[in-house]
Amino acid sequence: MKGFKLLATAVSLFAVCVFMVACEEDPARKVKVESRPAVVPPPIVTSVVTNPPDDPSLADPKKLLEFCPSIDAKALEPDVFTASGPCALQQQEPVLCNSLQDDFLVAFTRKMEHDATLVAYMNVEFYHGPGSYNHVEMFETLQHGENIYRWSNDVGQATVGPHEAYITLPKVELEAEPMLFNCTNTLGPATNYQFQCGRRGPTMLASVVYSGKLQCLAPSKRVKN
């Protein structure tokens, strides 16, 4: 009987020990998980009301002609990145390219007429090195003051060249989105391409078409992660 009591006591103590160990905080919970660095992340839009603009002429495609310099079609160079549509342009200067885990990010900003700013942004998703991809998020914006015109395509195609020296695009169509109004900041690298706007309105804009090659800045001139 005495041996049985000792055995029962030992079993009880063992159960208490197991219970105490199980109740201890998991050490893994104390490990600090670092968030992924936000390098030119996708834009954030906050819109609270959908209303037509105070000035209906803002939605007129002719309004864009005030901000976009005219381009002679005969002067366009083949294979150079070209945006055709409501605000045509060519980009010959090298642009920001940056690989971040499974994303390859490309962006550039252009100053337009009357202090307007144009931004082109591309994100090659599921990136694993140079090659061709079919899931490329793209957007273009033209901002003048608190108003933003915007075009986008979430499933574009692109090819990243060897050594990430360039990116080429076939003809990719970016559809016009509702205009944004009462925007509180200027879209661009300084704001990580994020923006916040108070209202949206209808648009009558045509699509934008991207094609051609964008040269990337040398690695030593790129943004560090």
Image (spheres, rainbow, N blue to C red):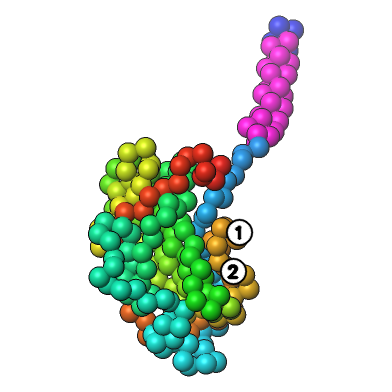
Residue at the spot 56% in from the left edge and 58% down from the top edge: 189
Q: Main secondary structure of the magenta part?
A: helix
Q: Secondary structure at mark 2?
A: loop
* Image position of 178 with respect to 215: above or below: below
Find residue 94 and report its horizontal and vertical position in percent. Answer: 43, 51
Find residue 61 and report its horizontal and vertical position in percent. Answer: 39, 85
* Image position of 221 with respect to 198: above or below: above
Residue at the spot 51% in from the left edge and 84% down from the top edge: 50
Residue 30 falls in image quadrant: top right
Which label was assigned to residue 190?
Answer: 1
Residue 172 inside the magenta-drawn segment: no
* Amino acid type at mark 1: Ala
Find residue 23 and report its horizontal and vertical position in percent. Answer: 69, 32
Residue 145 falls in image quadrant: bottom right
Find residue 174 and report its horizontal and vertical position in percent. Answer: 34, 69
Residue 28 inside the magenta-drawn segment: yes
* Image position of 165 with respect to 43: above or below: above
Disc 1 crowd, CA 10 A, few/some/many (<14, 14-19, 20+):
few
Residue at the spot 66% in from the left edge and 37% down from the top edge: 32
Which quarter of the figure is the C terminus placed in? top right
> What residue is pinned by disc 2?
186
